[in-house]
């Protein structure tokens, strides 16, 4: 809603006796303007501006005595410009998209949602396009957006899709039971499970046409995939396998198998959460274990995210845990958790927390969003606010540059005002960042 409260013309004058060639004289107009705009689905929530619109020019007279103003110069002088953001946690709207197994967002706050057998591109409350798989039985499971705007998606059964920035299909490629995608400078990588081997297999595809560049069986199951800043690929199967993307050679195998997810620190350290709880830090040079956190009694369903001070955050069933590497000791219990909290009502978290630039943690669990103080110095682990929804959540929330947080659930998207953006760390969210490219930031 936009309402112009005042658009008057309190002063206008023109004086000088009749001049030559129909010029009656100069004029000066001063107009007061006051605008009020309200939109409950946008940031800011409302805006108020006021000022003076000043116009100068020449006043001409026709042969029948009628005068006309000819503007020569016009300028708006603002006097008031005030805005009000929505309240923290306030609803910013929702979109009725079916599915919601995965969500990614680009730098322009366009979100890409795996929804049933479709990938939907949308801004807050403004759908842009929908791509529909030729297979009506497909269930989109992963989605990522590359820096050039290409969207990559995979369905759980058999296919990898490349979609251009307008929603048109660029190519498809076979990929059975793809668990993770990673987007590199010269290739798109998929960790799949080949039942004919049977083994986890790492595939590399050409971004141009989807042609197969190479593949490498790595054994075991397919769990997660991450891409280091130096281009090294880390595939999580029965262990962490480090692969050179240029020679396709296996560099080393280390860490532990059966873990739930990977993250990469600013110094290249690979972090993984073992299925029975402890956090492992793995040396990127040779795969040896640098240290482990104290054991935790709950199974971990997610990989970790990394905060501004290096603290790692992850979920273990209904627990949210925080561990800072600075607390590591050589003697048992090898460190101390910054905090451990139980999510309200025993909610189960199935995706890594998303870390905000303000240190808050955005945790999607069951049919709720929980926001915690993730700092380790002020009120660590304090629940700041929460909201309930209908339908379960499976993906890390995205934090947009508008200061809004968006949660994908199995019935629709929900957006709330967070008042912050995504933290600028090496791994602030599942998939590495909002784009979900599996790459260290």
Image (spheres, rainbow, N blue to C red):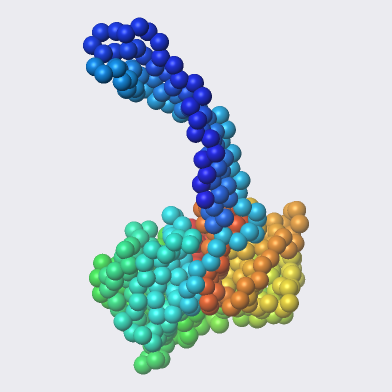
For the image shown, how many numbered marks are present on the structure? 0
Does residue 264 lie above or below 402 as drawn? below
Judge whether 21 appears above or below 370 on screen.
Answer: above
At 43% from the left edge and 26% from the top edge, which residue is drawn?
Answer: 75
Residue 388 falls in which quadrant of the image?
Answer: bottom right
Q: Which one is in front, 427 or 18? A: 18
Give the percent coordinates (x, y) of residue 439: 45, 63
The one nearer the camera, 248 or 345, is: 345
Please tell me which residue is depicted at 61% across the width and 56% down the height of the picture: 418
Which sits in the foreground, 93 or 184? 93
> Along the horizontal axis of the image, is 329 left or right of 425?
right
Q: Position of residue 146 (x, y in %)?
A: 38, 62
Residue at position x 54%, y 52% in the image: 39
Is 64 on the left-hand or right-hand side of 104?
A: left
Residue at horizontal 58 percent and vertical 78 percent from the top: 391
Tell me: residue 386, above or below residue 256: above
């Amino acid at each position: 809603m936009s309402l112009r409260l005042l658009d008057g013309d309190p002063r206008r004058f023109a004086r000088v006796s009749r001049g030559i060639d129909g010029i009656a004289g100069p004029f000066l107009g001063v107009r007061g303007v006051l605008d009020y705009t309200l939109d409950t689905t946008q940031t800011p929530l409302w805006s108020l501006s006021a000022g003076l619109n000043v116009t100068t020019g020449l006043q001409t007279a026709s042969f029948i005595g009628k005068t006309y103003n000819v503007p020569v110069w016009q300028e708006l002088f603002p006097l008031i410009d005030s805005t009000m953001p929505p309240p923290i946690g306030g609803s910013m709207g929702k979109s009725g998209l079916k599915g919601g197994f995965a969500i990614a967002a680009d730098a322009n706050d366009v979100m890409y949602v795996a929804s049933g057998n479709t990938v939907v591109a949308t801004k807050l409350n403004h759908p842009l396009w929908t791509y529909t798989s030729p297979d009506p039985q497909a269930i989109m499971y992963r989605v990522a957006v590359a820096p050039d705007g290409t969207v990559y998606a995979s369905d759980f059964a058999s296919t990898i899709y490349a979609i251009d920035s307008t929603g048109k299909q660029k190519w498809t490629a076979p990929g059975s039971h793809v668990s993770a995608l990673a987007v590199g400078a010269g290739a798109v990588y998929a960790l799949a499970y080949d039942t004919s081997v049977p083994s986890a297999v790492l595939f590399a595809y050409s971004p141009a046409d989807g042609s197969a560049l190479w593949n490498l069986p790595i054994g075991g199951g397919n769990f997660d995939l991450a891409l280091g800043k130096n281009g090294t690929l880390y595939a999580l199967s029965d262990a962490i396998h480090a692969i050179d993307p240029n020679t396709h050679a296996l560099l080393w195998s280390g860490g532990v198998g059966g873990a739930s997810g990977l993250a990469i620190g600013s110094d290249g350290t690979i972090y993984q959460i073992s299925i029975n709880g402890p956090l492992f830090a793995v040396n990127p040079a040779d795969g040896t274990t640098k240290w482990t956190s104290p054991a935790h009694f709950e199974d971990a369903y997610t990989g970790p995210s990394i905060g501004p001070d290096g603290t790692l955050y992850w979920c273990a069933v209904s627990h949210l845990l925080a561990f800072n590497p600075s607390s590591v000791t050589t003697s048992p219990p090898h460190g101390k958790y910054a905090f451990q909290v139980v999510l309200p009502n025993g909610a189960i978290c199935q995706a890594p927390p998303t870390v905000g630039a303000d240190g808050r943690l955005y945790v999607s669990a069951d049919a709720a969003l929980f926001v915690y103080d993730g700092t380790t110095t002020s009120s660590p682990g304090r629940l700041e606010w929460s909201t309930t929804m209908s339908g379960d959540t499976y993906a890390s929330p995205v934090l947009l540059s508008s200061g809004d947080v968006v949660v994908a659930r199995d019935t629709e998207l929900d957006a709330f005002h967070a008042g912050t953006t995504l933290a600028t760390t090496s791994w602030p969210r599942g998939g590495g960042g909002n784009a979900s490219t599996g790459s260290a930031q």
